[in-house]
Image (cartoon, helix red, strand yellow):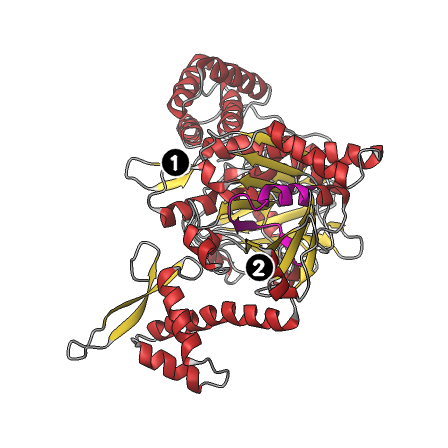
Amino acid sequence: MTNTDKQEPLFKVFPCGANKIPLIKDWQKLATRDAGQIKKWMDDFGSRIISWGVPTGSTNDIIVLDVDVKKSNGFETLKGLKLPPTMSQRTPSGGAHYIYKYPNGGATYGNRVNFMPSLDCRGEGGYICWYGSDNTPINKCPEWLLGGVGKLVDLAHPPQPTYSLDPSIASGIVASSLDAIRFAPEGESNNILNIESFRLGQLVASKAITREHAEQVLFNAAKERGKPDYEAKRTIESGLNGGSSKPLISPFGPPNIMIDIPQPPQPERWTPNYFTIKDLTDMSKLRRPQLFKDWSTCDIQITTADGGTGKTTLKLYEAICLALGERFLGFQCINPGKTLFITGEDTAAKLGAMLGAIVKQMGLLEDKAKLDIILSSIIVKKDADLCIISKDKQGFLYPNQQAITKVLEAIKEFKPKMVVFDPISSFWGSEAALNDMAKAVSRFMLQLVDEGLCVEMINHMGKVSSANKDMTQFAGRGGTGLPSHSRVSRVLRAVDDIEYQELTNQTLPDNTTALMCNINKFSDGSPFYNKPFLIMRNGYVFSRTDLSPAKEREECERVGDLERVFKYIKEMRLANKYPTKRVIVGYFMTCVDKLSEGRTKRALDMLQFDGFHGEKVKLTQGPDATSDDKVFVVVDMDGREI
């Protein structure tokens, strides 16, 4: 919806929420092209903005032919009519909007529903939701459309309605309003109650219903939705008072005067809409924005390590670098901002003291300008009772909406770029059904990612993986399948001075500890993917050191072996084949990029024991009962075959 020459919206817009309902009053007057105001709406309403409304009529100098397909096919009506080529967009229901120039002849063309079978017109006082158009220039409106809209209204002398609303129409509007209140989306109930009270206030003003009746039915619907009495009564009174000054007149029958409010919203269908040329040419959607280049993206991330390795301290150091826009472990900061820590173990006071120790060692205590930035950019919330997962009566796990509301409230007030859950296992209950729980956690985190955030989950490494120095293992206390649902996954493990010397051919400096870091998942691509490096810790600050070339190759091979063997088994199963150990070893000993028998067998052992990306391989009896050879299949972490 942009003008490529001016880099601004082509039309004046306003924010719409669920069911195409405007999120602001006086949307026709307040609709704007101003980028600052649009950004403010995005900050204020966040994920409540479902689409952008585009006022029709003189506000944007457009009149829109709305082709409906929900009750009958409006495209059939268009056959035989001359339809000049013009800018258009597909609607989610499968219909279309054809956007024409609004006539500038001193007359007003309003809204008209079904002026021909399944054809509507959006003119003065109406609006459409924006879904993305083609690039066809906006053309002159065809005369048959203007003729079908009805009587022209002189702007200087608009006629006044002298009749009230038909009772059958009024009862339908009341029923629609009450349903909207009862089934309002989470977080929208008060806003929708106010909007629907306004509509019924218009009916009261047109003498279609009494105010007492409107108050009673609105209050009953609000109670069904679970609204507190005092809050419901206050909202209903405000809405009724607002609507009473704008009586609703009938859009049906003679004398054919156009209404000056949008048509009642239609529920969205699940069926998706068609792609537009804009969708196919918008390459920005291929990659998420990054905070630190090749290290972090505005998506779900997980960092797994042993307890006591310094995960929290490392993340606080990263938050300081993010606030100041400085490099972190050598990774360039390209999107500076704030960090919200949500901790379930350490107190906020302890993390504040750790933050102070880092700042002191960095020599920033005397730099008031940088210190002020840090103090205003990092906040910590200790909430061990924050449970992000709920269970319904049937036992299904889903994101806890109350927890989401709490976190989104803090995000709206603080506006961070990164949110850290430390450790993630503190924020749910039982560790049963971990894979199902991981899916629910992912859905919770995706709602935060929709706010444009980098969401980091700190995870404890499993004891077996720690003992085996396994950098590919994703499990850990309370989160077997979490990395499968993350876009970036890192594993850290401690390295002693002997191993450090083996890895780098150097001696570990005094007063320094080392962590091996392997980025074993980076969905948008990173040159550090599966190329381990060392994170050096001196006191409270960190740096990065590379492995020696030989050791780097060795580590990469070990990680790569698991991935290659796992992918081969999965491909065989997708082809409905059952590979045996002998077949797998033989394949890798004869393929172009060979693996030795020993490396292949070690990879198979690890894949059975620890798995890969939240899945394992299992040795089981094959479908051929005449053969004693066991075969490999792929299972989830609960042992169910995939």
Nearer to the camera, 176 or 37: 37
Question: Is residue 54 highlighted in magenta?
Answer: no
- Name the amino acid type tagged 1: Gly
Q: Quadrant of the C terminus?
A: bottom left
Q: Earlier in the sequence, mark 2 or mark 1?
A: 1
Residue 502 location, x and y as percent?
60, 66
Residue identifier under label 2: 519
**Which residue is located at x 46 percent, y 73 percent?**
564
Query: Label 2 sits on what residue type?
Result: Ile
Any part of residue 100 in sight = yes
Q: Nearer the viewer, residue 323 or 344?
A: 344
Query: Which region of the structure is painted magenta?
Result: 294-319
- Please tell me whether mark 2 sits on a helix, a strand or a loop: strand
Instruction: Tell me the tag on residue 429.
Output: 1
- The spot of residue 479 in percent (x, y) is 43, 47
Q: Residues within 10 Å of mark 1 (few under 14, many from 20)?
A: some
- Residue 185 can be seen, yes or no: no
Question: Height in image: 453 above or below 367?
Answer: below
Image location (x, y in percent) of residue 405: 52, 32
Residue displayed at 71% across by 35% down: 357
Choose top left, top right, bottom left or bottom right for residue 223.
top left
